[in-house]
Image: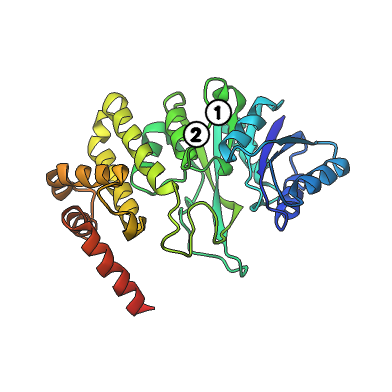
Amino acid sequence: MVTIIVPVYNTEKYLERCVRSVMAQTYKDLEIILVDDGSTDSSGKMADELAVEDGRIRVIHQVNGGSSRARNTGIDNAHGDYIGFVDSDDYIDEDFVSLMMDAIERYDVQMAQISRDEIDEQGERRPDVCIPPSEESLITSEEQLRELLMHRGDCSFCTRITKRELFDDMRFPEDRLNEDFYLLVEMLGVIDKYVILPKQAYHVFYRMGSNSRREDPEDFSRVFTDIVVNADHVEELVSVRYPFLTETAKRFALIQRLDYMLHIPISAMNKDNVFYNGVKRYLRKNFGRMILNRYLTPKNKAYLAVLAIMPRTVRSLHRKVKSIKR
């Protein structure tokens, strides 16, 4: 049996499309758990109505605690031998589960990953964030970690089917964003390899207002602090488990801080912001390693260098240039 867990929070416009795409799976030995995470719209009611229609669906209502807690609730209540996740505003092809379960059996692995695309609010397909492989690929944990550190791999658990027992001692970190990256890095330490499939059978619905997508430059998502925290975690992990990836991990830590520096509101770049000042100190302390890092592009190095020296000035100029281009 495969359990598909759908965390639900105020997605009444998209929930039915999502759940019906799961209900339509050609793989029939399926359990569907909808975790209503304290929705204040009609999402919870819609979930209950869908459960009446399909006996494979179970609905759990809980006080709002965030996506990670909702996923963990689903894991705690799952009966399946394997577990997958679908976000409630996304949707999947009918062979999403069957393709991965077939690959898991053929390759005798504990995890399979399928490829994804992104669809915007106008129904147009966006450029691929993660480039699908040209054919089925069996990848080792070390190879996948390198891909993640080079910002080429997909860390989302929504594009995976995972053996249930891997969650026995692991859960999504709660009260943190970028939680998929954190958990996958931990899980790579206990599996040898897994398979990646080329078909883009998972469809991400790209909409403004989600955790990392903001129209207002003063609306700063916590995800940009959490990616720095996770970068520090993986840098420590690499030093112990994968020392041959040390320079790659340093590149990752610097790029995550570049992302943070390019998104933090200029008004928050002040002496009272402890986290911001810590990022600035890290860039200055690692200035030499930044310049010598062979995995950083010249453009990366230039941005990091000037942001380390005069961050507020650079950000102000960056905003003016973007305004002129618009």
Q: Tell me residue 147's x, y (percent).
A: 37, 43
Placement of 93 over or under 217, stated as above or below: above
Dot 2 amino acid type: Tyr
Q: Residue shown at 31%/25% (left/top)? A: 241
Question: Is 221 on the left or on the right of 36, as rendered?
Answer: left
Placement of 253 over or under 104, stated as above or below: below
For the residue pair 87 and 98, the one nearer the viewer reads as 87
User: In the structure shown, which secondary structural element does the residue marked by tag 1 occupy?
Assistant: loop
Label 2 sits on residue: 194
Image marks 1 and 2: residues in contact by CB distance under 8 Å? yes
User: In the structure shown, which secondary structural element does the residue marked by tag 2 occupy?
Assistant: strand
Placement of 115 over or under 4, stated as above or below: below
Q: Quadrant of residue 253?
A: top left
Q: Disc 1 and disc 2: Cα gap in Å?
A: 7 Å
Q: Residue most toward the front?
A: 272
Label 1 sits on residue: 110
Dot 1 amino acid type: Gln
